[in-house]
Image: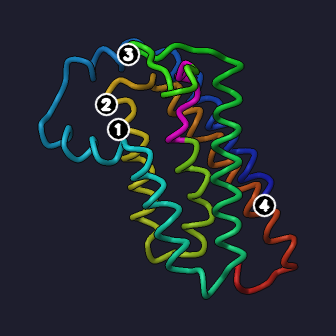
Amino acid sequence: MRKISDTLTLIIGSLLFLLSYKFDSQINLLFKNLKFPVFDAVLGVVTNFGFVVLVVVLIPCLAIYKKNRKLVYLLWLTFIASFAVSFAIKLIVLRQRPVEAFTYPFTHIINYSFPSMHAMVVFSLLPALIRYLPKQKSFWTGFAFLAAFSRIYFGFHFLSDVVFGAFAGYLLGIFYWNCMRKENYGNKQL
């Protein structure tokens, strides 16, 4: 049953990516002309990568460190892997951002658009966070979607960048979660 669910997730993600790619320009144009001061303020904080790392990596790690160190390692491993995979894909695809491209300070590497690193990172951590902290499932899921949406709202990414990043990140998170569960042979802590 689990394999069917994972396969269905992959199929739905692929279809959503293809559909979102078709509407990239229209969605980008919509948000270019549509701004709300409240969204600007809230999403301006949420779109900051440092804030995303603080909320989905550092705070959960500090909260669960004494209870479950393996989960802390899993969160960091998943974060680093999703960051690296996203960066590697960016260097392969080389898709320009909808807004004028900028470079990282001191390295002069152009920051490409595809996939959204924010979406990939936050959605890669989602499987572990919602399984280990189920009472906050709505918060983690809502925050992930808000962080991903902020990238489209400010025009940093096309819709397809975010959709691909979210689904690829989620699948990566499921992969690492399943690896950790197999390693623990059904340990109750995970």
Mark closer to the observer (4, 1):
1
The answer to whether residue 147 is above or below residue 113 is below
Secondary structure type for disc 3? loop
Q: Is residue 70 left or right of residue 49?
A: right
- The reply to whether dot 1 and dot 2 touch (C-beta < 8 Å) is yes
Kindly report which numbered mark, 3 or 1, lies closer to the viewer in this rendering.
3
What residue is drawn where x is 40% and y is 45%?
147
The quadrant of the image that shows the C terminus is bottom right
Horizontal side of 128 relative to 174 (left or right) equals: left
Disc assigned to residue 150: 1
The answer to whether residue 49 is left or right of residue 184 is left
Q: Earlier in the sequence, mark 3 or mark 1?
A: 3
Spatial separation of the CA atoms under disc 4 and disc 1:
34 Å
The answer to the question of whether label 4 and label 3 lie on touching residues, with beta carbons closer than 8 A, is no
**Which residue is under mark 4?**
1
N-terminal label among 4 and 1: 4
- Single out the mark in the foreground, 4 or 3: 3
- Callout in the foreground (3, 2): 3
Residue 30 place in picture, x, y as percent: 27, 19
The residue lying at 19 percent from left, 43 percent from top is 41
> Is residue 76 placed above or below 170 in the rendered structure?
below
Distance from Cα at disc 3 to Cα at disc 1 = 14 Å
The count of marks equals 4
Asked if residue 46 is among those painted magenta in the image, a careful observer would answer no
Is tag 4's residue or tag 3's residue first in the polypeptide sequence? 4
Q: Which residues are magenta?
A: 110-119
Q: Give the residue at mark 3.
A: 99
Residue 86 sits in quarter:
top right
Q: Amino acid at mark 3?
A: Val
**Does the stretch in magenta take in 112?**
yes
Q: Label 4, label 3: how many angstroms apart (C-alpha)? A: 43 Å
